[in-house]
Image (cartoon, coloured by chain):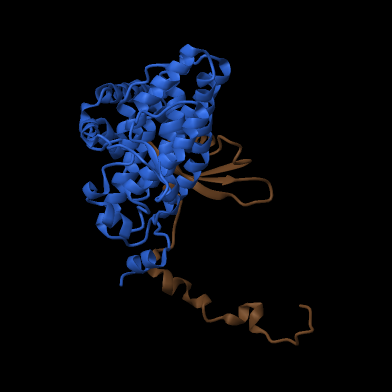
Amino acid sequence: MSDLWEVFVRPKRGLSHVHVGSLHAADAELALRHARDVYTRRGEGVSIWVVPSVQVTASSPDERDSFFDPAADKVYRHPSFYEVPDELQI
Amino acid sequence: MTSFESAIAEGARIEPRDAMPEDYRATLIRQIAQHAHSEIIGMQPEGAWITRAPSLRRKAILLAKVQDEAGHGLYLYAAAETLGVARSELYDALLTGRQKYSSIFNYPTLTWADVGTIGWLVDGAAIVNQVPLCRCSYGPYARGMVRICKEESFHQRQGFESLLALSRGTPGQHAMAQDAVNRWWWPSLMMFGPPDADSPHSARSTAWGIKRFSNDTLRQRFVDMVVPQAEVLGLTLPDPDLRFDAERGSWDFGPVDFTELREVVAGNGPCNAERLAHRRAAEDDGAWVREAARVHAAKHAQRGAA
């Protein structure tokens, strides 16, 4: 069986590519053509990326808490942390 | 409470690499695969009419619809694969009959009116079944269903339009439309599965957020949707017990023959053998194309490396 590819589509200029699903193809060129036929039959995209699924390195859901924790205690990164007079328009 | 249980309780989505009970995984693989197989086998009854469509317009529409069915099958196989099952295993399970597909595709398409009727009734029933799946607890399945439901609405509308043209056509065309509706009505009601009392896995699927409404609830919703549409079409539905219950605000309908459903699911429908034989032949006939693509890719990879 051929390789698995992840497909990313840019819906229109000015937007990022978004993951839409996966497909099987023998090589990158065929993966692109299949991606066009499977995921953009109604003009859903202006650009497609295909990436071999084995090339994706993902964070582990089991370590989600410890992995993302460092961001949780830095509330001063958010504008709402700061008290300014009400009349100030910033 | 496990992270899975709390996610389900909060109505959050489960994603591929999350921890999940093995039964949840197995249930989803079975359901998504069966759904994918249905889309792939579902290309056949209508596909048989592509070369015989009565006009270029109808032929182009039918071709686009059958291509959509292929696309839907592929979205769903991709969703099933995120659960750790290989595509080749799924194909094998279909071709060897270990996994099923929807009973409805084991009925023949005898006339051109069957194509419109499938769009109206079969795709109509599919939409009623599928819309709640857009909120299913498993992320990749739910996202696939959102895409599918958007495309299905074209399928149902084209079917209705095609059937309306026949119903308002010559007396012969009208009779053909009525005959097709007479044959597809009951099998369409069977698409919602056995009655709630005989649906053993329903409670668990509901608790897991895979199933949102019971088989009988969805069947009733379909009847209530379709009866007024039949009136607009100028066609009747072959059920003498069909009458509006003002108290319930719903249409009463006669008993569905679930023995027939069991028989068709068991492999004894009019076209079971034909559908699988056709699918196997397509798989065999396409083998050389896949092989050629593989060899081509390997050769180019080698040249690139040299």
**Residue B213: image x %, image y %?**
36, 52
- Residue A32 coordinates in the image, percent (x, y): 53, 36
Compared to B296, does A14 lie above or below?
below
Residue drawn at the location 37% of the way across and 49% of the way down:
B82
Asked if one can make out residue A26 in the rendered structure from this viewpoint, the answer is no
| Side (left or right) of A29 relative to B29 | right
Residue closer to the observer: B86 or B166: B166
> Quarter holding the N terminus of chain B?
bottom left
- Residue B226 is situated, as x and y percent measured from the top left of the image, at 45, 37
Determine whether A46 is above or below B210 in the image.
Answer: above
Q: Is residue B24 left or right of residue A60?
A: left
Indicate the quadrant where residue A89 lies: bottom right
- Residue shown at 52%/81% (left/top)? A73
- In this picture, residue B196 sits left or right of residue B289: left
Instruction: Count the marks.
Output: 0
Q: Which chain is blue?
A: B
Q: Residue at x 27, y 57 (%)?
A: B204
Give the x, y percent position of residue A22: 45, 44
Q: Can residue B22 be seen in this view?
A: yes
- Chain A visual colour: brown
